[in-house]
Amino acid sequence: MQKKPYQQRQEEKKGKLFQFQIVTVDVRGKIIKRTPKKARYQTEYLGKGVTLEMVYIPEGSFLMGSPETRRYNDENPQHKVMLEGFYMGKYPVTQAQYEVIMGNNPSWFKGKNRPVEWVSWHDAVEFCQRLSEMTCITYSLPSEAQWEYAARAGTRTAFYFGETITSELANYNHNHRKTTQVGSFPPNAFGLYEMHGNVWEWCADPWHENYEGAPTDGSVWEGEDPYRLLRGGSWYDFPSLCNCVIRSRLTSDFRLNSVGFRLVAFSAI
């Protein structure tokens, strides 16, 4: 039997292929293009019939933050970040996943396939620690740079499908009055779902007022601020708060029914 080329073998180590479709919209939010895509993922079995899908995010670089013409002060200076490849949750952590690992479900809007919410930053970190101990794979919250890179998926528009957002593309602005099941809206080009809206997602980084002195390698930017970063907007928020660059913050012990989290890992499962 003929051996597979080295590059092909290395790609296959990153996981199984899955196919999906991304959409592009015009300025009015009308879908003008549908494009088939592929990505690789790994599956972790958590127990009780519950699994975790982690999508491989390829190495690359991007401009983090906003250009001067359309930014808040905390989004500058725009700067280039280069990242190694990593894995990221295909969806935010669900209530079923959280309950298997933590033994409870604190969410307001119950549903095993809805994102877990009403979790503090400390709750999310504890989940990562318990999951890491169980699987011998190091799981963590994403750095802010990893989150934005993954959300953009190679785009430079406000949202990964274009410059505007509609209720067909994301859950925001009370359109659904609560969280929706993960996977309900189109993914981005990396194969990640609901990076806009549904729930805010905790990042590992403490709050910094702007990007002066920020790491350029995608690592967590350490600091002493008691606030922690949130990204992505939620079911409750205006569309302007759900774009790729908007930054928010809460104290690490705060809980809301619009805040959840998503996982990252560097090694294959």
Image (cartoon, rainbow, N blue to C red):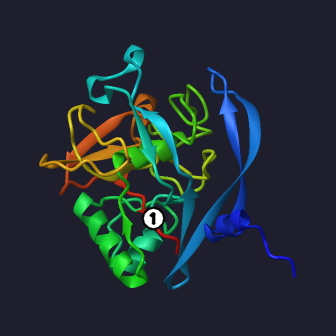
Task: Give, as a three-letter code, the residue at label 1.
Answer: Phe
The picture places residue 231, in percent across and down from the top left corner, at 37, 43
**Residue at the image point whose x is 34% and y is 81% from the top:** 133
Viewer-closest of 12 and 165: 12
Depicted 59 relative to depicted 239: above or below: below
Depicted 201 relative to depicted 1: above or below: above
**Residue at the image point whose x is 48% and y is 36% from the top:** 62
Q: Is residue 176 visible?
A: no
The picture places residue 181, in percent across and down from the top left corner, at 54, 58
* Side (left or right) of 53 relative to 213: right
Q: Quadrant of residue 57?
A: bottom right
To which residue does mark 1 refer? 266
* Side (left or right) of 16 relative to 236: right
Q: Quadrant of residue 6?
A: bottom right
Residue positioned most to the top: 69
Depicted 44 relative to depicted 184: above or below: below
Residue positioned most to the right: 1
**Residue at the image point whose x is 21% and y is 42% from the top:** 207
Q: Is residue 65 visible?
A: yes
- The quarter in which the N terminus is drawn is bottom right
Viewer-closest of 112 and 20: 20
* Side (left or right) of 70 relative to 91: left
The picture places residue 47, in percent across and down from the top left corner, at 49, 85
**Residue at the image point whose x is 40% and y is 81% from the top:** 136
Viewer-closest of 105 and 187: 187
Q: Mark 1: which secondary structure?
A: loop
The picture places residue 120, in percent across and down from the top left corner, at 25, 59
* Side (left or right) of 21 relative to 232: right
Depicted 58 relative to depicted 124: above or below: above
